[in-house]
Amino acid sequence: MRESIGIFYGISVGTGDPELITIKGLKLLQKVSVIAFPAGINHQPGLAEQIISPWLSSQQKKLPLIFPYVQDEARLQQAWKQAAIDVWGYLQQGVDVAFACEGDVSFYSTFTYLAQTLLATYPQVVIKTVPGVCSPMAVASVLGIPLTLRSQRLAILPALYRVAELEEVLTWADVVVLLKVSSVYNEVWTILQKLNLLDKAWIVERATQAEEKIYRDLGDRPHLTLSYFSLLIIQVTPS
Ligand SMILES: C[S@@+](CC[C@H](N)C(=O)[O-])C[C@H]1O[C@@H](n2cnc3c(N)ncnc32)[C@H](O)[C@@H]1O
């Protein structure tokens, strides 16, 4: 057992293809003895866990952490607190813990809430992160388009709680990326139709994964049932 506390690593593991993890991330993932990740739902492995499974050994301790998919702030805080307690249990014994994060660790990631809770509760904690491939970059690559060029203005909307927000952003942005589009797709389609932008929009579902699907022409698709892992790109101004 080491005398010092362990390091908490946030490792970006990319968007699905296990080869999209960086060499630095992979080396750490294979070196650290405790590997944490968001627990899947309905007893199925979560996405981060699926991505890293080819790289792990059976000797490594797997630490699934429960983060409920809810808006209720009190329930979320409780989950982050419990996860922080679980992780600290190893760190305080001098054992490093690596948290595998789908996409990039700093891009709308659960890792950040956990890291902030750890810092607030145990200020002596040491946290290091490894960057990686986030979903807008992966989707641009899948579509074979540049995400942005020259002086184009890029807007990333993490989630749409008021669809009017999208109309406002479309007045100034050249390229718009909409995360979590699955729950608001019908409303978004109506706005794009009104603004004549349906032929400038693409959806990629489960980019870089075996189930990857591209929707290029949204004109005749007012209704789509999409996975949570779907992203919409609108090229408002041609590049
Ligand atoms: C909470 S955010 C997490 C973003 C992630 N940390 C990243 O770096 O991309 C979840 C949203 O990211 C997008 N997303 C993540 N992975 C994706 C993938 N493989 N294909 C398409 N969209 C994805 C979806 O819009 C999803 O609703």
Image: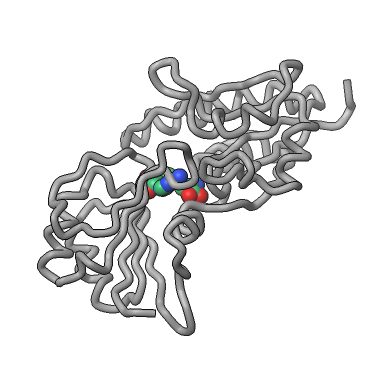
Q: Quadrant of the C terminus?
A: bottom left
Q: Quadrant of the N terminus?
A: top right
Nearer to the camera, 16 or 188: 16
Q: Is residue 180 left or right of residue 141?
A: left
Say which residue appears at 48% left-offset and 83% top-offset.
150
Q: Position of residue 183 (x, y in %)?
A: 24, 43
Q: Name above or below for residue 40 compared with residue 192.
A: above
* The quarter of the displayed image where residue 216 is located: bottom left
Q: Position of residue 108 (x, y in %)?
A: 47, 49
Nearer to the camera, 81 or 52: 52
Q: How is the image coloured?
A: one colour
* The quarter of the displayed image where residue 64 is located: top right
Q: Position of residue 65 (x, y in %)?
A: 54, 24
Q: Name above or below for residue 39 compared with residue 230.
A: above
Say which residue appears at 72% left-offset and 16% top-offset.
58
Q: Name above or below for residue 197 compared with residue 25.
A: below
Q: Name above or below for residue 195 compared with residue 107.
A: below
Q: Is residue 21 left or right of residue 103?
A: right
Say which residue appears at 71% left-offset and 46% top-offset.
128
